[in-house]
């Protein structure tokens, strides 16, 4: 075979390959593959059963507090952080259209009508000229290497991240609202306990004064009893301040002025106690259920698509453009005439020397993708840690409730016995004062533990990513895909 013939066949094969690539539409860059990482089969203090999708269960209803249920229902639709996150979905959705528009044909039409003439001694024409014209321009960048397709993939992934961000905002709101409500009820309980303790200590103080008059008590006894009364009185304003701050924060979370809910929340109610099942699922559930992990995965998908968009800029680009411009001109005293001009043709743009900018852009996108992958891994591990900690807290803190309840009972019994003994003159006032302090401390510890256990369940269900969507929202929510 001659050298010239071999060269021609080689050229034909190259041309055929190039034509095939152009016709099929090669897409540059890697395709996104959902990331994976090894996880334990179960949590250390959890079970082996998967939870499935836990986006809809309303776990806060297990506190059996209708007022809390109403606050949550109102806040999910009115919380300003949630509304801002939902608005970002609209922006991300519009960006999908913008990202893909570059690969579609563009047509613009212009029209004009101009009236012209001359005045003055140096004029060369007499009368006026009417010129009516128009122009239609068509351009189309042939996206052979997938620059705009990859850009659209990135925008779709970013839309998925926006949905996950909104879900995470709802979950953050639930945690903040329910824990603030638990705090408010705790401070109410502490205020009630302090007032009951104040009443008891006031009675002891009055009894000591009677004993002093009867010669059965000293001035020191009276002073000590009065000091305990004043100490209790000084605790109440601080607790009332903390309750007010919690009520104000709840109102703010619901998008209302701070003092709007004071009247409603001041109505007495017991401390919330969780009466539901302990459902932690397995670590693999977190990848599907936790919004922050889904957000990190979608951001990784967007970063991978950006690699392809950057690589496409390394290759030639071909665009088709054409225009047609009809016009009609009529001068005074003359008949009108028309003129139509048109043009059409392809143009080729080939990057040759750019100082390494385009390749550096590819490396930047690759680095961003690696960073997003590490961020995804960090989100998964952080989620596992939060669930493990929440399970430990629920189990350990719950174990302290019964001993504390028993401690309160024994302290109250000791106070009753000390009071009777003091009245009979068989014990000193110091025994009563010590017993009152013990009762007060035990009741405060019990109330604080009830508060903490209630918040432990909040931490657990937020950590597994539960309850941020209503069932109707799940049915209508689009699934964001990367292609």
Image (spheres, grey):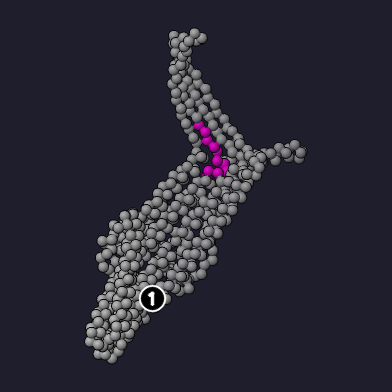
Tell whether 250 sits left or right of 50. Answer: left
* View extreme (right): residue: 2
Give x and y (percent) for residue 137: 50, 29
Q: Residue at x 51, y 49 (%)?
A: 154
* Residue range corresponding to the magenta coloring: 138-149
- Residue 171 screen position, x and y as percent: 40, 60
What residue is rendered at 55% in x and 52% in y? Answer: 304
**Can residue 368 be seen in this snapshot?**
yes
- The local crowd at label 1, few if under 14, some if 14 to 19, many if 20 or more residues have their Cα within 10 Å, is some
Where on the picture, by quarter, is residue 267?
Answer: bottom left
For the question of whether residue 200 can be seen, the reply is: no
Helix, strand or loop for disc 1: helix
Residue depicted at x 55% and y 48%: 306
262 to the left or right of 344: left
Please report the residue visible at 53 percent of the width from the left and 59 percent of the height from the top.
375
Q: Nearer the viewer, residue 118 or 415?
A: 415
The quadrant where residue 14 appears: top right
Residue ID for mark 1: 398
Could you say where residue 17 lies in the image, as x and y percent from the top left? Answer: 63, 42
Decide which of 253, 310 is in the foreground and name it: 253
For the residue pair 370 and 4, the one nearer the viewer reads as 370
* Rendering coords of residue 322 (x, y %): 53, 29
Quadrant of the image containing the N terminus? top right
The quadrant holding residue 247 is: bottom left
């Amino acid at each position: 075979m001659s050298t010239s013939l071999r060269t021609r066949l080689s050229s034909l094969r190259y041309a055929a390959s190039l034509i095939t690539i152009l016709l099929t539409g090669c897409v540059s860059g890697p395709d996104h593959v959902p990331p994976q990482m090894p996880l334990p089969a179960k949590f250390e203090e959890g079970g082996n059963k998967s939870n499935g999708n836990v986006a809809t269960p309303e776990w806060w209803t297990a506190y059996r507090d209708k007022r809390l249920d109403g606050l949550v229902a109102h806040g999910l639709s009115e919380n300003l952080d949630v509304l801002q996150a939902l608005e970002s979905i609209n922006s991300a959705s519009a960006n999908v259209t913008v990202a893909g528009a570059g690969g579609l044909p563009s047509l613009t039409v212009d029209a004009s009508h101009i009236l012209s003439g001359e005045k003055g001694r140096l004029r060369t024409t007499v009368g006026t000229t009417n010129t009516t014209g128009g122009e239609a321009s068509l351009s189309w960048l042939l996206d052979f290497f997938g620059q705009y397709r990859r850009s659209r993939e990135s925008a779709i992934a970013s839309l998925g991240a926006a949905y996950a961000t909104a879900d995470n905002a709802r979950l953050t709101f639930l945690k903040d609202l329910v824990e603030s409500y638990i705090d408010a009820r705790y401070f109410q309980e502490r205020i009630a306990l302090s007032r009951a303790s104040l009443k008891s200590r006031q009675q002891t103080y009055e009894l000591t004064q009677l004993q002093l008059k009867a010669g059965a008590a000293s001035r020191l006894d009276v002073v000590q009893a009065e000091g305990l009364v004043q100490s209790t009185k000084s605790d109440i304003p601080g607790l009332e301040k903390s309750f007010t701050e919690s009520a104000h924060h709840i109102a703010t979370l619901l998008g209302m002025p701070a003092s709007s809910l004071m009247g409603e929340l001041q109505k007495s109610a017991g401390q919330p106690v969780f009466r539901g099942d302990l459902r932690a699922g397995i670590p693999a559930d977190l990848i599907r259920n936790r919004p922050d992990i889904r957000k990190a995965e979608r951001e990784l998908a967007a970063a991978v698509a950006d690699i392809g968009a950057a690589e496409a800029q390394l290759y030639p680009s071909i665009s088709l453009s054409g225009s047609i411009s009809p016009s009609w001109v009529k001068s005074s005293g003359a008949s009108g005439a028309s003129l139509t001009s048109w043009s059409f043709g392809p143009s080729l743009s080939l990057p040759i020397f750019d100082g390494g900018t385009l390749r550096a852009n590819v490396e930047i996108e690759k680095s961003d993708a690696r960073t997003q992958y590490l961020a995804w891994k960090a989100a998964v591990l952080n989620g596992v840690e939060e669930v493990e900690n929440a399970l430990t807290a629920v189990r350990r803190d719950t174990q302290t409730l019964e001993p504390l309840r028993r401690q309160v009972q024994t302290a109250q019994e000791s106070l009753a016995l000390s009071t009777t003994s003091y009245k009979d003159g068989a014990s000193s006032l110091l025994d009563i004062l010590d017993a009152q302090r013990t009762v007060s401390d035990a009741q405060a510890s019990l109330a604080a533990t009830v508060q903490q256990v209630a918040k432990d369940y909040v931490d657990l269900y937020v950590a597994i990513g539960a309850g941020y969507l209503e069932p109707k929202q799940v049915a209508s929510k689009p699934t964001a895909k990367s292609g």
